[in-house]
Image: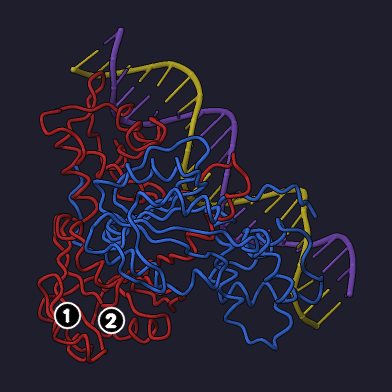
Chain colours: A blue, B red, C purple, D yellow
Amino acid sequence: MKNNNKIPPATVKRLPLYLQCLELIDDKTIGISSKKLAELAKVNDAQVRRDLSYLGTLGTRGVGYEVSTLRNQLQLELGLVEGWSAVIVGVGNLGSALAHYGGFQERGFGVVGLFDDDPRKINKQIAGLVVKPISEMQNTCEKYNVAIGIIATPGKVAQEIADKLIECNIKSILNFAPVLLKNTADVQIRSVDLSQELQILSYYLDRPVLKAVE
Amino acid sequence: MKNNNKIPPATVKRLPLYLQCLELIDDKTIGISSKKLAELAKVNDAQVRRDLSYLGTLGTRGVGYEVSTLRNQLQLELGLVEGWSAVIVGVGNLGSALAHYGGFQERGFGVVGLFDDDPRKINKQIAGLVVKPISEMQNTCEKYNVAIGIIATPGKVAQEIADKLIECNIKSILNFAPVLLKNTADVQIRSVDLSQELQILSYYLDRPVLKAVE
DNA sequence: GAGTGTGAAAACATTCACAGCT
DNA sequence: AGCTGTGAATGTTTTCACACTC
């Protein structure tokens, strides 16, 4: 065992995956082996054991892992137990999709505010929340001690929104706008660019072999 | 020079990023150095040079890279010149967001079909396309020789849709449903799970100084 | 002088293979 | 016998540092 609390980034990326796999498992299943979990997550079984070993000594030799322990430990390590609050800025189609996305609430993220500056959207109700103007964001963030800001605006205003979120004392930003945000020292920024994902896929599409430039 | 046409995955993931950076650049700027590009993309400058060197010898020593050459070469390498066709399955909020997303058409991906089995959505017009029942997918895919299928359905039906897409002879799938799709040998699958992204962020919430993943 | 292209080193990540526990 | 936890081996990615070109 090693628990010196420093989990490699590559492992952190897989922890939510393991958690997802465990959630699929029949509730009466009590134990699981690294081999079985690896199969569900589509990774190598040594990988699973190594990854889990960073969380402490969770398994029992000769037996396997207890599903509930594993689940708890993963949630704990990922900070899903604290129950972070989030706000979504921009309630176009993507923002609405995110607001409706049940997965968030289930996994410990409470969406406590939706913001947009389009007058046609303000006061609309979406997924049980009322859309408010961005000027009210600061208020909400203070009131609920919001840790996460989700940006689903057009690219043009994304940086401006990011700056405002940082002023609101937010700790992390999940950005869906197709721009690179300036990153400040103490705010974690993660970007998901839908069109970049497609471009990566595109590379792997077979196509007539490119001529080598000798 | 080396052009043996085998680009490491880590590099492929950064190519769309470089392309995005170049698109931001003033049209009259004719040359760019690895240092400048690295700054825009927020990576190390040696990384930029190494990555670009996989595409061939594109720069000029002592001078830098020509923006237009670089852009062309990146587009070529990523297969964005061929103009792949895509279909979107599931036109809830997320599917609509994707259909409206201008970035796709701009970058060589033509969305040629929207499909859904909800009778309330069929025949609706979204982003200039009419939503059709999934039974018509095969037709459209054949007609336009569609290479990419985008899944934006609820998780429950995602696997079923994936199977149908594969039957339609599609070559790649971009999956937004929060499930792990069975992967077949000859179809590339890329998944984006919105709630997993949040969970990764969450891990870094506690610990202010850790480096972001990816 | 400025800036690329690339060997070589360093850092990081995955996988093998097996000792050791149940 | 079965399965974990982990050294050691292997593979991949990043970074350094410098010869080389303009």
Amino acid carrying mark 2 in the image: Leu
Spot occupied by residue A66 in the image (x, y as percentages of width and height): 75, 76
Could you tell me which secondary element the residue under label 1 belongs to? helix
Residue drawn at 47 percent across, 62 percent down: A112
Q: Is residue B10 visible?
A: yes
N-term mark: 1 or 2: 1
Which residue type does callout 1 highlight? Cys
Mark 1: give few (<14), some (14-19) or many (20+) Cα within 10 Å. Answer: many
Q: Is residue A168 toward the left or the right of residue B145 in the image?
A: right
Query: Which chain does tag 1 point to?
Result: B
Q: Which mark is residue B20?
A: none
Q: Which residue is mark 2?
A: B165
Label 2 secondary element: helix
Q: Residue at x 22, y 21 (%)?
A: B63
Q: Where A186 falls versus A176 (above or below)? A: above
Residues behind callouts 1 and 2 on a single chain: yes
Density class for disc 2 (Cα within 10 Å; few <14, some 14-19, many ≥20) is many
Label pair 1/2, CB-CB below 8 angstroms = yes
Task: Give the residue pinned by disc 1.
Answer: B141
- Residue B115: image quadrant is bottom left
Q: Quadrant of the C terminus of chain A?
A: top left
Answer yes or no: is residue B9 visible: no
Q: In the picture, residue A70 is in which quadrant?
A: bottom right
Quadrant, the N terminus of chain A: bottom right
